Image: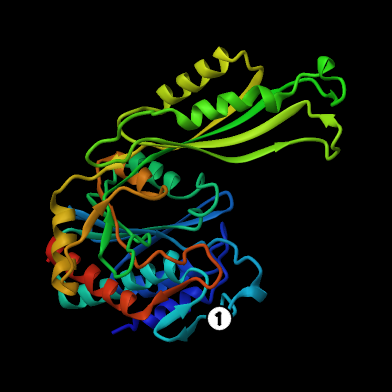
Amino acid sequence: MRDVIKTTFDLVSRQSVTPHDKGCQGYMDAILSPLGFTNEIMVFEDTTNMWSRKGKAKPVFCFAGHTDVVPTGPTAKWKYPPFEPTIDNGFIYGRGTADMKGSLAAMLCATERFVTDYPDHKGSIAYLITSDEEGPFINGTTRVIDTLEARNEKIDYCIVGEPSSTLKTGDTIKNGRRGSLTGDLIVKGIQGHVAYPHLVKNPIHAISPVLTELASTTWDQGNDFFPPTSFQVSNINAGTGAGNVVPGTVEICFNFRFSTEVTDQQLIERVVALLAKHSIEYEIKWTFNGQPFLTPRGTLIDAVVESIKEVTGIDTELSTAGGTSDGRFIAPTGAQVIELGPENATIHKLNECVSIENIETLEDVYYATLVRVLA
């Protein structure tokens, strides 16, 4: 059988910085094709996607993930070259080991084991893989889903291999995610000399009480599955570079991570009302990044929870915390979606690494889940 650590090495060694795939999907194709999968490459603009399926029957059990990784940052600050995977003290170091090439390797190895052990399994196994998850996410999973929906090809159960765990594989799985809404705000003022305040209109002063109110607002109370909606400013830019000039504009980027207790439209309306209350002159661009989604207890969660318990002895925690994932594009089709992957402590950081034990365990959990759902 295929070795999950070697497979992780093979994937990590490909420098697939988003949106580039650098042959990762071709490598996966070469593994899946001999197992009976039909692989369909979908290229949209600068993004390479793969839809791979074995079987035509229902239910469709899908592994979803991405081959792209974030940039490395200064390579001189890495302990080992980021695209030369290296084992040190039980960990594999390299960009993408945790997010999420280790998961892809575990999926491939678990699938090979399952198809070998259960050649006449029920239903279908599928892979939905993109090279545009870490980037703008406009030509990746969302467009593959649009294609599948247009031909009425449905996913029933989906495991997204995002690094969901904290310390040990399976200690946490994500059965939902908050929605995400970004606002790019330009506040307009009048530029001039700081010594003549009566001739200027300082946009920084004007927007400051608004930001204070936005940051202190209770948007909702959350619920049993989601924490309360949060507002965070991520970027502020203003000024000419001179210390004696009042700027004419200030640019502010902020983001809401919202629960199912509020909609994106309600958040927009409340922000606009607050800007009007303070007589702010502005322009704003809204970017909707995805609705919140939640998968309740059912076939998929039960199978994953039982598999984690069988393999690790852990009673897993269901969580909706963290950022967004491509699960937000798959769940609205009616699929049951969860995220299960290795530890996430080093994702996107210098010296990203993953425990060998956790990747090996992940393969076993994926295999056990396939057995429970499709054997």
Work out which residue is located at the far front of the displayed protein and give it: 195
Q: In which quarter of the image is residue 208?
A: top right
Is residue 128 visible in the rendered image? The answer is yes
Q: Mark 1: which secondary structure?
A: loop
Could you tell me residue 270's position as x and y percent?
46, 20
Residue toward you, 267 or 341: 267
Residue toward you, 319 or 212: 212
- The colour scheme used to paint the residues is rainbow
Could you tell me residue 204's position as x and y percent?
69, 28
Q: Quadrant of the N terminus?
A: bottom left
Q: Quadrant of the C terminus?
A: bottom left
Number of numbered discs overlaid on the protein picture: 1
Could you tell me residue 91's position as x and y percent?
42, 80
Left or right: 246 as drawn, with respect to 343: right
Residue toward you, 80 or 139: 80
The amino acid on which the numbered mark 1 sits, given as a three-letter code, is Glu
Answer above or below: position of 92 versus 368.
below
Write the residue at 35% across / 61% down: 161
Write the residue at 60% across / 79% down: 81
Q: Residues within 10 Å of mark 1 (few under 14, many from 20)?
A: some
Instruction: Name the residue tied to disc 1.
Output: 84
Is residue 121 visible in the rendered image? The answer is no
Residue toward you, 152 or 20: 20
Could you tell me residue 2's position as x and y percent?
32, 83
Write the residue at 41% across / 47% down: 324
Answer above or below: position of 307 versus 79.
above
Left or right: 263 as drawn, with respect to 60: right
